[in-house]
Amino acid sequence: MNSQENFYDVIVVGAGPGGSAAAEKCGEYGLKTLIIEKEKLPRDKPCGGMYSGYIKELIELYGSEINDLVERRTDRVKIYLDQKIIFSENYSIDSFLRKKLDYFITKGAIRAGAKVMDNCRVIDIIINSKEVRVFTEKGIFVSKIIIGADGVNSIVAKKIGLNKGWGRNDVSLAMESEIKMSNKEIEKRFGNCTIIYTYSNFLGYEWVIPKNGCVNIGLGTSVSKSSDLKEQFVALAKRLNIEMKTKDIKAHMIPLRMLKKTYKERALLCGDAGGFTYPLTGGGIETAIKSGRAAADICNEAVENNDFSLKMFKKYESYCSYFVKEIKKSRLQLSILEFCMKYKLINRYLVDKFFRFMVK
Ligand SMILES: Cc1cc2nc3c(=O)[nH]c(=O)nc-3n(C[C@H](O)[C@H](O)[C@H](O)COP(=O)(O)OP(=O)(O)OC[C@H]3O[C@@H](n4cnc5c(N)ncnc54)[C@H](O)[C@@H]3O)c2cc1C
């Protein structure tokens, strides 16, 4: 490869929903775009796969094809507090398999002109006044701008000095397992319901998300409170009478706090890399897509105006403000919930009120 071939307008690190959405929009703008992904694609990601946003918004972005990717549309949400039901209402929730959803968006990016290099880990990044140099297992790539969409452990965020490491209360640890089950059995055991279990002494929640031919069970809590999480997971499976092997439990962290700054000259962070998730629920697919698309808008403006100054990249804050408002609301609710738990104020009314926010 000669140096011209290795030079891009935008390099996106990570082919999750954030990176793929960003690359797709960059491609649509006509920017020469490269996605670098450490895994072989299509890759899976530990996730419940429950979509927190409005499916209408996804259809507007990706067309009605997205409906074919919905594994199941449950029509009822049930929430339990200490094993007693406190909330049971008709509400539609769509769930996906991440391997399919994420690759669908990546393929959209390829169609829009982005190049993808998978099986290629980014190791280092150096930004100077003229360019961004991205060091990978397969060589060095150069671009005008870098988008870090490489998840909660983002190497981009670390190398460019925007994340010196999450605090123990800034991230949650979540675990999930997708268990094969016939649709007949799913209907018999859970109905067409998404089920959430909350506890007055556990700042987090357990979930049961029925899909098509499998059911996703999982739980999550702040890392600082997660010492017995695996035992709790096994107990959840036992209670649900679900046979599973502990080796099938997949765990990953979720940010509970946005980074103070998610941009600098020639660089933007989106999705989990920037901490764009709803802290109360841990949901981050929707915000990864939204922040990825906002990052692409900034890239387009910067390249068009040949302006890579901090002032240009600071505009990212206002491009994200429409969903960051919701993230901040969710963060406040998590803090209130934490306070109530500390002073043993948790009751049915409170949990009902909080989780109404979750199902909008
Ligand atoms: C157990 C669990 C359950 C969850 N359930 C839900 C849910 O039901 N609904 C919901 O909305 N959200 C859920 N989330 C959160 C959701 O998974 C994330 O918010 C979402 O995946 C963020 O997308 P992203 O594109 O920012 O990052 P990711 O999806 O994490 O993608 C980052 C990509 O970057 C790649 N990468 C990382 N480092 C490098 C590197 N050095 N070089 C190259 N590539 C790299 C990774 O391989 C990965 O493909 C859950 C999370 C967990 C852990």
Image (spheres, rainbow, N blue to C red):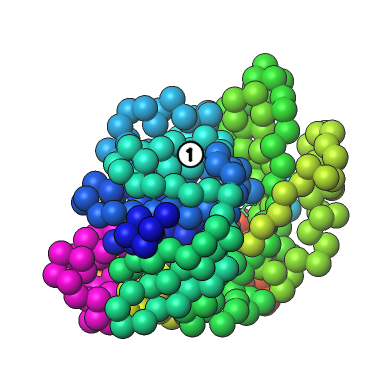
Above or below: residue 342 compared with residue 174 = below
Q: Is residue 43 toward the left or the right of residue 245 in the image? A: left
Amino acid type for the residue under numbered disc 1: Tyr
Residue positioned most to the front? 2
Residue position marked by numbered label 1 in the rendering: 103
Q: Is residue 327 toward the left or the right of residue 4 in the image? A: right
Above or below: residue 9 compared with residue 49 = below
The span picked out in magenta is 294-317
Residue positioned most to the left? 305
Above or below: residue 294 compared with residue 74 = below
The quarter of the rendering in which ligand 1 is drawn is bottom right
Q: Decide if ligand 1 comes within 8 Å of the CB at mark 1.
A: no
Which residue does the image show at 68% across and 62% down from the upper left?
173
Q: In terms of depth relative to the viewer, which is nearer, 22 or 63?
A: 22
Which residue does the image show at 56% across and 54% down from the upper left?
120
Which corner quadrant of the image does residue 314 belong to? bottom left
The answer, for residue 224, to whether it is visible in the render is yes
| Percent x, y of residue 310 | 27, 82
Above or below: residue 241 compared with residue 287 = above
Q: What element carries label 1?
A: helix
Which corner quadrant of the image does residue 11 belong to? bottom left
For the stretch drawn in magenta, the main secondary structure is helix
Q: In which quarter of the image is the N terminus?
A: bottom left
Q: Is residue 135 toward the left or the right of residue 84 in the image? A: left
Q: In terms of depth relative to the viewer, which is nearer, 111 or 50?
A: 111
Which residue does the image show at 72% across and 24% down from the upper left?
181
